[in-house]
Image: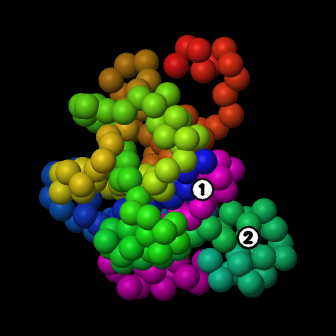
Amino acid sequence: MALVYVALLHFPVYDKNGAVVTSAVTHMDIHDIARSGRTFGVRRFYVVTPVAAARELSERILAHWGTGHGAAYNRTRKDALAIVRLTDDLDRTITDVELDAGATPLLLVTSARTRHPTISYAALRRLVHEGGRPLLVLFGTGWGLTEEVVGRADYLLPAITGVDDYNHLSVRTAASIILDRMCGARDQAEEALS
Protein backbone atom coordinates (compact mmCIF):
# COMPACT_ATOMS: atom_id res chain seq x y z
CA MET A 1 0.00 0.00 0.00
CA ALA A 2 1.20 3.48 -0.85
CA LEU A 3 1.30 6.02 1.95
CA VAL A 4 -1.49 8.56 1.45
CA TYR A 5 -1.21 12.15 2.65
CA VAL A 6 -3.75 14.96 2.34
CA ALA A 7 -3.17 18.72 2.30
CA LEU A 8 -5.79 21.45 2.57
CA LEU A 9 -4.31 24.58 1.00
CA HIS A 10 -5.48 28.02 2.12
CA PHE A 11 -2.96 29.74 -0.17
CA PRO A 12 -2.63 30.14 -3.08
CA VAL A 13 -6.33 29.84 -3.87
CA TYR A 14 -8.81 31.90 -5.86
CA ASP A 15 -11.67 33.99 -4.55
CA LYS A 16 -14.97 34.16 -6.46
CA ASN A 17 -13.60 36.99 -8.64
CA GLY A 18 -10.50 35.04 -9.67
CA ALA A 19 -8.05 36.93 -7.45
CA VAL A 20 -5.33 34.95 -5.67
CA VAL A 21 -6.02 35.10 -1.94
CA THR A 22 -5.40 33.42 1.39
CA SER A 23 -8.60 31.86 2.75
CA ALA A 24 -9.59 31.47 6.39
CA VAL A 25 -8.89 28.25 8.28
CA THR A 26 -12.06 26.75 9.76
CA HIS A 27 -12.15 24.34 12.67
CA MET A 28 -14.87 22.27 10.94
CA ASP A 29 -12.52 21.56 8.02
CA ILE A 30 -9.79 20.44 10.42
CA HIS A 31 -12.10 18.17 12.43
CA ASP A 32 -14.02 16.64 9.56
CA ILE A 33 -11.16 16.04 7.13
CA ALA A 34 -9.08 14.56 9.95
CA ARG A 35 -11.93 12.19 10.79
CA SER A 36 -12.27 11.16 7.13
CA GLY A 37 -8.51 10.82 6.82
CA ARG A 38 -8.29 8.63 9.90
CA THR A 39 -11.18 6.48 8.62
CA PHE A 40 -9.50 5.89 5.26
CA GLY A 41 -5.93 5.36 6.48
CA VAL A 42 -4.40 8.74 5.64
CA ARG A 43 -0.97 9.00 7.25
CA ARG A 44 -1.01 12.79 7.72
CA PHE A 45 -3.43 15.61 7.04
CA TYR A 46 -1.74 18.98 6.49
CA VAL A 47 -3.50 22.28 7.09
CA VAL A 48 -1.47 24.69 4.98
CA THR A 49 -1.62 28.44 5.61
CA PRO A 50 0.97 31.23 5.60
CA VAL A 51 -0.98 33.11 8.30
CA ALA A 52 0.79 32.64 11.63
CA ALA A 53 -2.31 33.59 13.66
CA ALA A 54 -4.35 30.90 11.86
CA ARG A 55 -1.69 28.28 12.62
CA GLU A 56 -1.59 29.40 16.28
CA LEU A 57 -5.38 29.10 16.61
CA SER A 58 -5.24 25.68 14.93
CA GLU A 59 -2.51 24.60 17.37
CA ARG A 60 -4.77 25.60 20.28
CA ILE A 61 -7.64 23.56 18.82
CA LEU A 62 -5.35 20.54 18.34
CA ALA A 63 -3.97 20.88 21.89
CA HIS A 64 -7.48 21.00 23.36
CA TRP A 65 -8.43 17.74 21.66
CA GLY A 66 -4.98 16.13 21.92
CA THR A 67 -3.95 16.79 25.50
CA GLY A 68 -6.56 19.12 27.01
CA HIS A 69 -10.08 18.53 28.27
CA GLY A 70 -11.23 17.38 24.83
CA ALA A 71 -8.80 14.45 24.84
CA ALA A 72 -10.59 12.85 27.78
CA TYR A 73 -14.02 13.93 26.59
CA ASN A 74 -13.81 12.45 23.07
CA ARG A 75 -11.11 9.83 22.46
CA THR A 76 -12.08 9.26 18.82
CA ARG A 77 -11.64 12.96 18.05
CA LYS A 78 -8.19 12.83 19.68
CA ASP A 79 -7.26 9.85 17.48
CA ALA A 80 -8.41 11.62 14.32
CA LEU A 81 -6.68 14.92 15.09
CA ALA A 82 -3.41 13.11 15.82
CA ILE A 83 -2.79 12.93 12.05
CA VAL A 84 -3.01 16.73 11.60
CA ARG A 85 0.11 18.76 10.87
CA LEU A 86 0.33 22.52 10.32
CA THR A 87 2.59 23.94 7.61
CA ASP A 88 2.96 27.35 6.06
CA ASP A 89 3.30 26.44 2.37
CA LEU A 90 3.12 23.61 -0.15
CA ASP A 91 6.89 23.23 -0.51
CA ARG A 92 7.36 22.68 3.24
CA THR A 93 4.49 20.20 3.15
CA ILE A 94 6.16 18.23 0.35
CA THR A 95 9.44 18.28 2.28
CA ASP A 96 7.70 16.94 5.39
CA VAL A 97 6.15 14.11 3.36
CA GLU A 98 9.57 13.31 1.86
CA LEU A 99 11.13 13.14 5.33
CA ASP A 100 8.33 10.94 6.65
CA ALA A 101 7.96 8.61 3.66
CA GLY A 102 11.54 8.57 2.40
CA ALA A 103 10.46 9.49 -1.14
CA THR A 104 9.07 12.43 -3.08
CA PRO A 105 5.28 12.19 -3.25
CA LEU A 106 3.18 12.13 -6.39
CA LEU A 107 0.96 15.23 -6.33
CA LEU A 108 -2.75 14.65 -6.93
CA VAL A 109 -4.87 17.75 -7.50
CA THR A 110 -8.61 18.04 -6.95
CA SER A 111 -10.99 20.50 -8.54
CA ALA A 112 -14.72 21.14 -8.71
CA ARG A 113 -14.21 21.89 -12.42
CA THR A 114 -13.72 19.12 -14.96
CA ARG A 115 -10.14 19.19 -16.24
CA HIS A 116 -8.35 16.91 -18.66
CA PRO A 117 -6.57 14.62 -18.70
CA THR A 118 -7.51 13.01 -15.42
CA ILE A 119 -6.62 9.73 -13.77
CA SER A 120 -9.59 7.43 -13.18
CA TYR A 121 -10.42 6.41 -9.64
CA ALA A 122 -9.88 2.76 -10.62
CA ALA A 123 -6.32 3.62 -11.74
CA LEU A 124 -5.84 5.69 -8.60
CA ARG A 125 -6.91 2.76 -6.40
CA ARG A 126 -4.31 0.62 -8.21
CA LEU A 127 -1.65 3.25 -7.37
CA VAL A 128 -2.72 3.12 -3.73
CA HIS A 129 -2.79 -0.67 -3.52
CA GLU A 130 0.36 -1.36 -5.56
CA GLY A 131 2.48 0.83 -3.31
CA GLY A 132 5.43 2.76 -4.62
CA ARG A 133 5.77 6.50 -4.17
CA PRO A 134 3.67 8.23 -1.52
CA LEU A 135 0.59 10.13 -2.69
CA LEU A 136 -0.17 13.70 -1.61
CA VAL A 137 -3.74 14.77 -2.39
CA LEU A 138 -4.15 18.56 -2.59
CA PHE A 139 -7.50 20.13 -1.76
CA GLY A 140 -8.16 23.82 -2.22
CA THR A 141 -10.30 26.20 -0.23
CA GLY A 142 -12.02 29.36 -1.44
CA TRP A 143 -12.83 28.95 -5.13
CA GLY A 144 -10.11 26.40 -5.78
CA LEU A 145 -6.41 25.88 -6.25
CA THR A 146 -4.51 28.28 -8.49
CA GLU A 147 -3.25 27.28 -11.92
CA GLU A 148 0.28 27.42 -10.49
CA VAL A 149 -0.56 24.63 -8.05
CA VAL A 150 -2.53 22.65 -10.64
CA GLY A 151 0.48 22.88 -12.96
CA ARG A 152 2.63 21.05 -10.41
CA ALA A 153 0.33 18.02 -10.34
CA ASP A 154 1.41 14.57 -11.41
CA TYR A 155 -2.28 13.63 -11.69
CA LEU A 156 -5.56 15.53 -11.89
CA LEU A 157 -8.49 13.83 -10.20
CA PRO A 158 -11.90 13.79 -11.86
CA ALA A 159 -14.34 16.37 -10.55
CA ILE A 160 -17.12 15.03 -8.37
CA THR A 161 -20.31 15.52 -10.32
CA GLY A 162 -23.94 15.24 -9.39
CA VAL A 163 -27.12 15.06 -11.43
CA ASP A 164 -26.91 18.51 -13.02
CA ASP A 165 -24.52 21.46 -13.25
CA TYR A 166 -24.84 22.48 -9.58
CA ASN A 167 -21.47 21.64 -8.03
CA HIS A 168 -20.76 23.41 -4.73
CA LEU A 169 -19.79 20.71 -2.25
CA SER A 170 -17.91 21.73 0.86
CA VAL A 171 -14.26 20.74 0.80
CA ARG A 172 -14.99 18.47 3.76
CA THR A 173 -17.60 16.56 1.78
CA ALA A 174 -15.43 16.39 -1.34
CA ALA A 175 -12.49 15.08 0.69
CA SER A 176 -14.63 12.29 2.16
CA ILE A 177 -15.95 11.23 -1.24
CA ILE A 178 -12.50 11.27 -2.85
CA LEU A 179 -10.86 9.36 0.01
CA ASP A 180 -13.60 6.74 -0.17
CA ARG A 181 -13.10 6.39 -3.93
CA MET A 182 -9.32 6.12 -3.46
CA CYS A 183 -9.00 4.02 -0.34
CA GLY A 184 -12.41 2.71 0.64
CA ALA A 185 -13.25 -0.99 0.60
CA ARG A 186 -14.77 -2.25 -2.65
CA ASP A 187 -16.42 -5.54 -3.37
CA GLN A 188 -15.61 -7.51 -6.52
CA ALA A 189 -18.78 -6.43 -8.32
CA GLU A 190 -17.95 -2.76 -7.76
CA GLU A 191 -14.38 -3.25 -8.95
CA ALA A 192 -15.61 -4.97 -12.12
CA LEU A 193 -17.71 -1.90 -12.92
CA SER A 194 -14.77 0.49 -12.46
Q: Is residue 105 above or below residue 57?
A: above
**Residue labelled with disc 1:** 42
Mark toward the viewer: 1 or 2:
1
Magenta-tinted stretch:
33-61
Q: Quadrant of residue 66?
A: bottom right
Query: From where the camera sits, is residue 93 visible?
Result: no
* In this picture, residue 7 sits left or right of residue 154: right
Q: Residue farthest to the right?
A: 72
Q: Is residue 186 above or below residue 194?
A: below
Residue 23 % position (x, y): 33, 65
- The three-letter amino acid code for the residue at tag 1 is Val
First along the sequence among labels 1 and 2: 1
Residue 111 % position (x, y): 33, 42
Q: Is residue 163 above or below residue 97?
A: above
Please give the name of the residue rendered at 39% of the width and 73% of the height, measured from the top-left corner. Answer: 95
Contact, mark 1 vs mark 2 (Cβ under 8 Å): no
Q: Nearer the viewer, residue 154 or 81?
A: 154
* In this picture, residue 163 sits left or right of residue 194: left
**Residue labelled with disc 2:** 78
Query: From where the camera sits, is residue 168 visible?
Result: yes
Residue 85 % position (x, y): 53, 73
Q: Secondary structure at mark 2?
A: helix
